[in-house]
Image (spheres, helix red, strand yellow):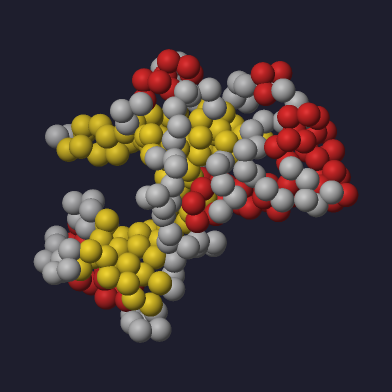
Amino acid sequence: MRIQSDNTPSPSSALTELGRIAVGEKVERSGQVVPSSIDSFRIRGDHAEAVHKVYGETITELPILFYSDQEEIVCNERLEIRTADGKLFGYGDNHTFHIWNDELKKYAVTTVEKRPQIRDETVAFLQKNLHPGKAKLIKWLPVLTLRFVIRDIPLLGYWQFSTRAILTTIPNLRNKFDEYKKLFGSVQYLPFLLKVKKVKSNKPGLVYQYPIVDLVPQFSFETAHRLARHLRENPQADVSHWLSENGDKPEQLPSTME
């Protein structure tokens, strides 16, 4: 598992957060509000209407561009732990951890060299005085966050998608991102589709559906093969420029889900 640096985008960046994208929503069941997965992207934030105006009300795929090659910015993986009411109490990369200090009113930094049991200590602290049913929910969980630009949206800023689906979407997106970056040498400004669909569990005795988010290059295999060959011959080539001159036109590609 690639747990990345716990850095976040610099506040001085020219790009600001425009909104967040999710594949879940909160619904009321038996008098309680609980999370529920959906088979389309839920756009959140003040600029959500701008996205729906271009791509419709029910969105299952979005054409995106990564505005950086830095994994800690556009494909960041880290561990997080939250309080019983959902507040972020700590995060880290399995070596360096940021733990909330209520006296200082900020996240204090420590490492596993200084506090080898920091993960267990944090869990025990947050579980203290909780009902067993709630206490068992307190745990460190990996979170993968993508940050990207949505094409054809006339706003300067990035959108954010985060997932805790450790067995499905996290390895799928992480591995795809790493593979494409290795293959092309860069993912910056390359055209991708972010797609979501619900799949059925194929495990015996389990009947349920869950969403998987996928990252798909918006150009054909033939173009990818020619690009890879071009990069082997010209390691310093501008990938996005080559695609604009030699690649598929995004509007010519099929955009429906399989």
* Residue 138 in picture, x, y percent from top left: 27, 61
User: Residue 234 location, x and y as percent?
Assistant: 84, 49
Q: Report the front residue among 123 and 114.
A: 114
Q: Inspect this view and state whether residue 87 appears.
A: yes
Q: Nearer the viewer, residue 240 or 96?
A: 240
35 to 152, vertically: above or below: below
Q: Is residue 224 left or right of residue 112?
A: right
* Front in this rendered view, residue 10 or 191: 10
Q: Quadrant of the C terminus?
A: top right
User: Quarter of the image holding residue 226?
Assistant: top right
Residue visible at 50% across and 56% down?
72
Residue farthest left in this picture = 129
135 relative to 96, above or below:
above
On the picture, is 54 further left or further right than 254?
A: left
Residue shown at the point (56%, 41%) measured from the top left: 66
Q: What's the residue at 47%, 17% (across, down)?
A: 54
Residue 106, percent from left and from top: 23, 64
Tell me which corner region of the image, top left, top right, bottom left or bottom right, holds residue 194. Answer: top right
Q: Quadrant of residue 19?
A: top left
Number of numbered labels in the structure image: 0
The answer, for residue 136, to whether it is visible in the render is: no
Q: Quadrant of the N terminus?
A: bottom right
Does residue 204 sit above or below 123 in this rendering? above
Residue 144, above or below 2: above
| Residue 256: image location, x then y, percent | 61, 21
